[in-house]
Amino acid sequence: MTLRVLIVDDEPLARQHLIDRLATEEDVEVVGTADNGDDAISEIRRLDPDLVFLDVQMPGRSGMEVAEQLGDEMPRTIFVTAFDQYAIKAFDVAAIDYLLKPFDDDRFHEAFRRARKAIGKSSWLQRIPVELRGQTRVLPVDLIDYITASGPYAELHAGGKTFAVRERMQQLEERLDPEVFMRIHRSVIVRLDRIDVMLRSAGGDYAVRLKDGTELSLSRAKREALEEKLRD
C-alpha cells in the first residue's frame, strides 16, 4: 500500500529536501505541497493524505494552528522546525515525531519509520537498485544471501555475485523484514534460512557458516538472539 504524503513548509529548499529524502523510500507518493497554513488546511481536506510533514513557523497561520483548526481531521503528522521550544506542544497535538532542523538521514529515517508503523502501511524492502556493468538493475531481496559493510557502501552477496550499493547497514537493517534477515554483527546482515551452523573458535569468537560454506562473523551480543531466531 502506498503512503500518501503532503509536505507543508514556507521554504522551497526545505520542501525539496523532504521530497528528495522521500524519493529514496519505497511505496511513497508525495501527493502535494503547501507553503502556508491556510493552503495546508485546504490541501489536507482536498487530498486526505496519510502523513503530513508540517513546518511550525510559517507566515500567517502556524503549523500548530493548522493542527488545532483541523482537530480530528488532522492526519498523522511529523512537525519540522528550526525551533525546539515547540516540541512539547507538538506532542500535545498528537504528532508522531518532531524533526529539528537541520536533521540528518538517520534522524529522518527514524521519524519516517515511526510514521509508517503508526499508520499501519509498513512494507519491507523488496527490491534494491544496483549498478551492473554501467547499468542500473533491480536486485530482488529474495536473492540476497548476506550483506557486508564496505566503508560508506554495503555489499550485497547473491548467488556468488557481489553488488555494491550506497546504503548504510543501519538503513538496510531497518528496511529488511526482521523475520527473514538479521544483523548478526556491525558489519554483517544475513538471511536466516541461509545459515547452516553456528561456530565458536578456540579463542571464544563466534561465527556462522552458511549452506554454501561462507563463514561470517557473529558478535557475542547477537549470539543468543540468533539462537532464538533459528529455533523458531
Image (tube, rainbow, N blue to C red):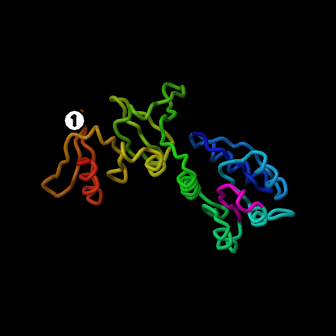
Q: Quadrant of the N terminus?
A: top right
Nearer-the-camera pick, 109 or 180: 180
Q: Amino acid at mark 1?
A: Gly
Mark 1 neighbour density, 10 Å: few (under 14) some (14–19) many (20 or more): few
Classify residue 174 as left or right of residue 83. left
Q: Position of residue 138 (x, y in %)?
A: 50, 29
Residue beneath the point at 26% across and 59% down: 220
x, y (%) of residue 27?
58, 39
Q: Is residue 96 depicted above or below 173 in this figure?
A: below
Res 154 → quadrant: top left
Kind of element beneath mark 1: loop
Q: Where residue 28 sits in the image (x, y, percent)?
A: 62, 42
Residue appearing at x 25%, y 55% in the figure: 223
Instruction: Give the answer, above or below, for where 124 lies relative to 62.
Output: above
Residue 77 lies in the magenta-colored region? yes
Q: Residue at x 74, y 60 (%)?
A: 55
Taking the image as shown, residue 116 lies to the left or right of residue 146, namely right
Q: Is residue 199 above or below residue 93?
A: above
* Front-most of residues 175 and 216: 175
Is 58 left or right of 146, judged from the image as shown? right
Relative placement, left or right, of 119 versus 69 is left
Residue 158 sits in quarter: top left
> In terms of depth relative to the viewer, which is nearer, 64 or 169?
64
Residue that numbered label 1 is attached to: 213
Residue at the front extreme, as displayed: 72
**Which residues lie in the magenta part?**
70-81
Residue 223 part of the magenta segment: no
Image: 22 above or below 131: below
Q: Position of residue 26 (x, y in %)?
A: 56, 40
The residue sitting at the left extreme is 202
Number of numbered callouts drawn: 1
